[in-house]
Amino acid sequence: MLPPGVYKKGSIDFLDIYREVITSLPREAGSVLTFIGVTKAFGLKEVKKLEMESYEELANSAIAEICKEVEEKYNVFLVRIYHLIGEFEVGEPLVFVVVVSRSRKEGLDALKEAIERYKSEPALWKKEIYLDDSYQWISHA
């Protein structure tokens, strides 16, 4: 399976990752939970597009650590976070999180923590470009 981390837009397909996950489930698995984050139209002002950048080595290390720690904390089978970098139009997907667990309760708890942590810990930055062509850099995606 593709390791969790940061990937250039167009280099991976979230549906392919999902298919791989569901075709290799442990027999004890009772839930597969996913989250897809998309570029939203409103940040500080109305957004035209978004540019995501990262310090890939640090971001990949942080994302791998988040996945490992969340797996252990909630005793789930799998946590994977895949974050895309590049230029995104409003509505385009840019992050995919998947959790495989025995039951939905620990899976939902693990998914929530994985989402909150990827938004604050890895070396990721977004540049919101607004309709008036002004922009704002925002640390942590």
Image (cartoon, rainbow, N blue to C red):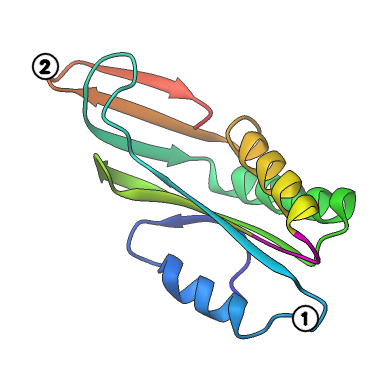
Q: Nearer the viewer, mark 1 or mark 2?
A: 1
Residue 6 percent across, percent down from the top left: 52, 53
**Residue at point 83%, 49% (across, down):** 69
Location of residue 117 (image quadrant): top right
Specify start and end residues of the magenta stretch as a single range: 99-103
Dot 1: few (<14), some (14–19), or many (≥20) neighbours within 10 Å? Answer: some
* Residue carrying label 1: 26
**Residue at point 88%, 58% (across, down):** 75
Residue 30 percent across, percent down from the top left: 74, 70
Residue 20: in magenta span = no
Residue 108 percent across, percent down from the top left: 70, 49
Tag of residue 9 = none
The answer to whether residue 15 is left or right of residue 5 is: left
**Residue at point 36%, 51% (across, down):** 93
Compare residues 107 and 44 and report the one nearer the observer.
107
- In the image, residue 7 above or below residue 29: above
Task: Pick whichever of labels 1 and 2 is earlier in the sequence.
Answer: 1
The answer to whether residue 34 is left or right of residue 113 is: left
Location of residue 53 (image quadrant): top left
Compare residues 51 and 71 and report the one nearer the observer.
71
Q: Secondary structure at mark 2?
A: loop
Residue 83 seen in this snapshot = no
Residue 102: in magenta span = yes
Residue 73 percent across, percent down from the top left: 88, 48
- Specify the farthest residue to the left: 132
* Residue type pointed to by label 1: Pro
The answer to whether residue 101 is left or right of residue 97 is: right
Location of residue 1 (image quadrant): bottom right
Distance (Cα) linking label 1 and label 2: 50 Å
**Residue at point 75%, 44% (across, down):** 109
Tag of residue 132 = 2
Q: Name the magenta segment's main secondary structure.
A: strand
